[in-house]
Each structure stands twice: as C-alpha cells, then as structure tokens.
Amino acid sequence: MGKSQETFGKKEKEKKRNKARQDKAEKMQERKANATKGKSLDDMMAYLDENGNLSSTPPDPRKKKVFNQEDMQIGVARQVEGEMDPVRKGVVTFFNDDKGFGFINDLETQERIFVHVNQLTERLVEKDKVTFEVEMGPKGPSAVNVVKEK
C-alpha cells in the first residue's frame, strides 16, 4: 500500500496559506465597512492657522495680513562689497604641517576658512590668533596674507 502524499510540513503550509487568505478577506471587509467614499470637499480640507498648525476650521478673514512682494526676501542676503573690514581676525582651529593646510575660525562671522601654507608668513599651530584677508578660491573662501598676532 502506498504512502500518503501529504506530509506534516505540507499540511502546515496549507493551513498557513488558508489563514492568510482568511485574514486578507477579513481586512478587505473591514476596509469596505469603514470606507469614507463620498466625503465632501469641505470634509477633506485642512487649513493652516496663524501659528502654522493644521486645523479643520478656515482662518478668520479679519486676521488676514497683507505682504508686499518687494519686502519678501528669498534665500541668503547678498553681501555688499566693502561692507566688512577686508582684514579679519580669527583663531587657527586645525593645521597640518605635513599636508600644508588648515582652517581658521573667523571671530566675527564664525565662518570656517581654509588656509594653505603658501599664504603664511610664519609657522602656525592650533589656537594661534591671526589676522587675514578672505579671497574666493575654486572650492570656497580661503585665507590670504595670514599674519600671526603677537
């Protein structure tokens, strides 16, 4: 007499598949029962209040503020030439003698500025106070005419 083709593993897999089908069908029925089709546009609308929070009520038109397009500034403000002193002061935060470069923190703008050994008048180490000028290099601002303060 031949053995049954169904093993315990096959029975377990079939039970899992049937359970998954049943769960899927139940979820589909639940979604259909709780469906919110046919909502009106007003029910779907969300508004922002004056503090930037979402609310379901429209804002009060009496609290409306009017802005002039000319007064709005988008992006970073442009710096006017000659606005800053060309000679700046800073502190060396990193300098590698072997590689010949480092960084200076500008005391006024807190900007980190690259410095190359070719722009130095004397050897620098970390925490040295320096005066320098800023020039735009190919990868951003770099310090030139760097002089160590005494």
Image (tube, rainbow, N blue to C red):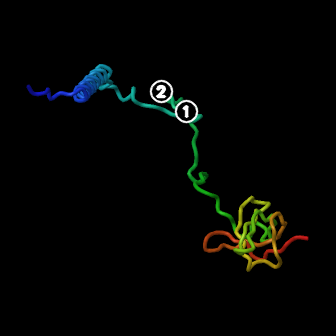
Instruction: Report helix, strand or loop for mark 1.
Output: loop
Residue shown at 74% from the left, 77% from the top: 117
105 to the left or right of 74: right
Query: Which residue occupies the foreground of this view, 104 or 42?
Result: 104
Q: Residue furthest right?
A: 150
Q: Residue furthest left?
A: 1
Could you say which quadrant of the image residue 102 lies in? bottom right
**Quarter in which the C terminus is drawn:** bottom right
Q: Position of residue 56 (x, y in %)?
A: 47, 27
Give, as a three-letter code, the residue at label 1: Asn
Could you say which quadrant of the image residue 85 lies in? bottom right
Give, as a three-letter code, the residue at label 2: Ser
Query: Which residue occupies the foreground of this view, 137 or 98?
Result: 98
Q: Is mark 2 in CB contact (under 8 Å) with mark 1?
A: no
Residue to which mark 2 is pinned:
56
Q: Taking 97 as reference, is 47 above or below it?
A: above
Residue shown at 66% from the left, 72% from the top: 136
Instruction: Report helix, strand or loop for mark 2.
Output: loop
Q: Give neighbour class at mark 2: few <14, some 14-19, many 20+ (Cα, 10 Å).
A: few
Could you say which quadrant of the image residue 2 lies in? top left
Q: Position of residue 88 (x, y in %)?
A: 80, 68
Q: Residue furthest front?
A: 1
Residue to which mark 1 is pinned:
53
Q: Taking 40 as reference, is 142 above or below it?
A: below
Q: Position of residue 64 (x, y in %)?
A: 56, 35
Query: Which mark, by number, is residue 31?
Result: none
Give the Cα distance between marks 2 and 1. Answer: 10 Å
